[in-house]
Image (cartoon, rainbow, N blue to C red):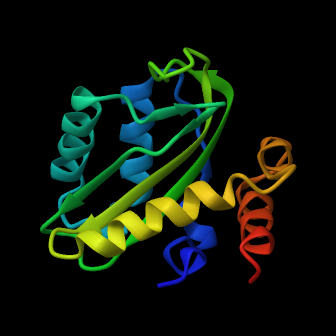
Amino acid sequence: MKLIDALSSERCLLIQAERRDAALREICRHAVALLPDSEAFLQALFEREALMSTGLGDGVAFPHARSKQVQDFFIVAGLARQGINWDALDERPVKLIFTIAGPMDRQEHYHTLLANLASLLKTPGLKESLLESENAIDFHTKLKLAAGN
């Protein structure tokens, strides 16, 4: 699966929440059509965050979870202009959030998707460009172009 196949324009949003847990709730509400039980997936995200923050540093977080209810991988990407305290490794606020959902039985694809996303975000100037997005469609278009699609 190509990275951009997991991320459609409908799965990009401008996050209004000011706290991590509220942002995760907002993301799950946005993905409700893909999640038969968005509350169970939200709990899986909370459990993952309790193990260790998915705030990687440099303003980026990759909350992620696998679930029996997820049939195929998808990503919900969000821009939080206001910055959110995510307990990131560098203690800086998170503004770019890429929530990855995957099925329980495809671990290697899950890790590949995470690695590909991390690699994409190393594209010179991409993070800065994403932060300047006017709306969710602009955000998705910039990701798609950077991914070569």
Q: Can residue 13 be seen in this view?
A: yes
Q: Is residue 12 visible?
A: no
- Which residue extends farthest top? 91
Q: Which residue is drawn at 56% across and 60% down?
A: 117
In the displayed structure image, the side of residue 51 where residue 64 appears, left or right: right
In the displayed structure image, the side of residue 67 where residue 49 appears, left or right: right
Please say if 64 is above or below 5: above
Please say if 31 is above or below 71: above
In the displayed structure image, the side of residue 120 where residue 29 appears, left or right: left
Q: Which residue is drawn at 72% across and 52% down?
A: 122
Residue 10 lies, in percent from the top left, at 57, 68
Please say if 58 is above or below 126: above
Pick the residue in front: 27 or 90: 90
Displayed quadrant of residue 23: top left
Q: Which residue is drawn at 37% across and 64% down?
A: 111
Pick the residue in front: 118 or 36: 118
Q: Residue at x 40, y 60 (%)?
A: 31
Residue 29 lies, in percent from the top left, at 38, 50
